[in-house]
Image (cartoon, rainbow, N blue to C red):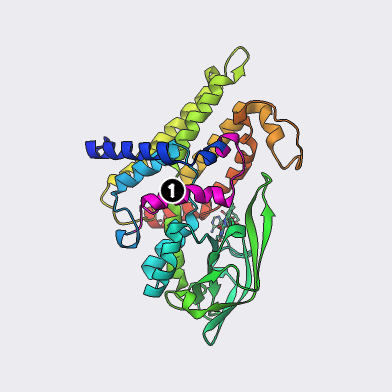
Amino acid sequence: MEMEFSPEELAFQQEVRTFIAENYPAQLRGKQDEGDELSKEDFLAWHKVLYEKGWIAPAWPVEYGGTGWTPTQRFIFSEETARAECVKLMPFGLTMVGPVIYTFGTPEQKARFLPRILSGEDWWCQGYSEPGAGSDLASLRTAAVREGDEYIVNGQKTWTTLAQHADWGFFLVRTNKDAKPQEGISFLLIDMKTPGITVRPIITLGGEHEVNEVFLENVRVPADQLVYEENKGWTCAKFLLAHERTGIAGVASSKRGLEKVKEIARTEVDGDKPLLSNAFFKRKVAELEIDLTALEFTELRGLAGPNANKGPGPESSLLKIKGSEIQQRLTELTLEAVGHYGAPYFRGFDEGDNAHPIGPDYAHRAAPTYFNMRKTTIYGGSNEIQRGIIAKMVLGL
Ligand SMILES: Cc1cc2nc3c(=O)[nH]c(=O)nc-3n(C[C@H](O)[C@H](O)[C@H](O)COP(=O)(O)OP(=O)(O)OC[C@H]3O[C@@H](n4cnc5c(N)ncnc54)[C@H](O)[C@@H]3O)c2cc1C
């Protein structure tokens, strides 16, 4: 397998690096360096820069606004944005509903929704999970009943990420109670300002408002916002979940995270020596680095292999499991490295405290990030579910 970039790819890497250096919003960099919470406008600031450059949706077909890059160029781009610690783009429009719409949508739906996803005018959220339907998603009960040119939707969704900012949501709803569970589901696009929708925050362990409950009471949705066919929504749902899992490995940002852990452990001391020279700590860092390198090679093998252009398959479950475990181990090591400096910054303890921060800057986000990243082995299909997929689809058990 060829592991070196070609001269053209190296030139592309330099082009991306220069673009980021010259165009990444300075105010955003400042907030990130300070460890401040980012607003909707912050996330959209970088989105807009990439949109204006034409680089906002590298994986989309060119006819809908994609860049036409090779898989390796896309890999280089994600490596460079992670290396420069650019803020992550919201996936709900770009990686989730966008591909569903250009694959299954009508020409009118494509014309109406895709340009606004690209420009960042519409912020999307994902209404799949319900209190009784997470891993067993097909048991969802939110119901949509057709009345003339509208669907009337009633039910509840949960864990809906950043729904408080969303203009639109894509929802899985039950349109046939009598069919087999997977055969009675439809995929609806719903304007989040429609009367009858209530978004209620769920505050997570790290004290953040990232997820929500969404209640739908007699919400009237125009029937032309149904994607694909009534009762065929499961096809869209499965297609979208495979897309959700690609890029979930987060190799590039974990590489940057590992460098940061090493920097911290060179600064923090254990007795009179840098923490990084402590044999136990060093071993954990080395094990993580080996696992991360193995994951990177697995991802590259996918890029270079015979299935490179076929889109995500069940192998993406493997990347999701290892990638999420590594992300969690990184936050554990960071918290261990900052030691007691991490504790005061766990906002769950002392909401409203205005005491002057103590300890080094890099300690401020260690605890909230540690708690926040527990989610990675749950969302996008829990790691237990991914293991089931590998057993069945990859190993044929
Ligand atoms: C931070 C965060 C953000 C999220 N954002 C969204 C969002 O924006 N939109 C959305 O729709 N959903 C979202 N989710 C929901 C997520 O998809 C679900 O939490 C996930 O699918 C698991 O479902 P559950 O929480 O109902 O757990 P359950 O399905 O009840 O699972 C509980 C436990 O049992 C295990 N388990 C269940 N079934 C099996 C099985 N067959 N074999 C082995 N083990 C099993 C699970 O692995 C888990 O450990 C988010 C979740 C989190 C944590």
What residue is shown at x 53% (from left), y 87% (from top)? 148
What residue is shown at x 46% (from left), y 39% (from top)? 253
**Could you tell whether 255 is left or right of 6 in the image?**
right
What residue is shown at x 51% (from left), y 29% (from top)? 260
Residue 201 location (% of width, % of height): 68, 57
Instruction: Provide the residue designation for mark 1.
Output: 49
Observer-nearest of 213 and 89: 89
| Figure disc tally | 1
Residue 292 location (% of width, % of height): 43, 36
Q: Quadrant of the C terminus?
A: bottom left
Magenta stretch, main secondary structure class: helix
> Is residue 159 among what the camera can see?
no
Mark 1 CB within 8 Å of ligand 1 = no
Question: Is 384 situated above or below 133?
Answer: above
Question: Is 291 situated above or below 186?
Answer: above
Question: Is 70 situated above or below 177?
Answer: above
Q: Quadrant of residue 3?
A: top left
> Is residue 290 among what the camera can see?
yes
- Tag 1's secondary structure? helix
Q: Quadrant of the N terminus?
A: top left
From which residue to which does the magenta span run?
31-60
Q: Quadrant of residue 197?
A: bottom right
Q: Quadrant of residue 162?
A: bottom right
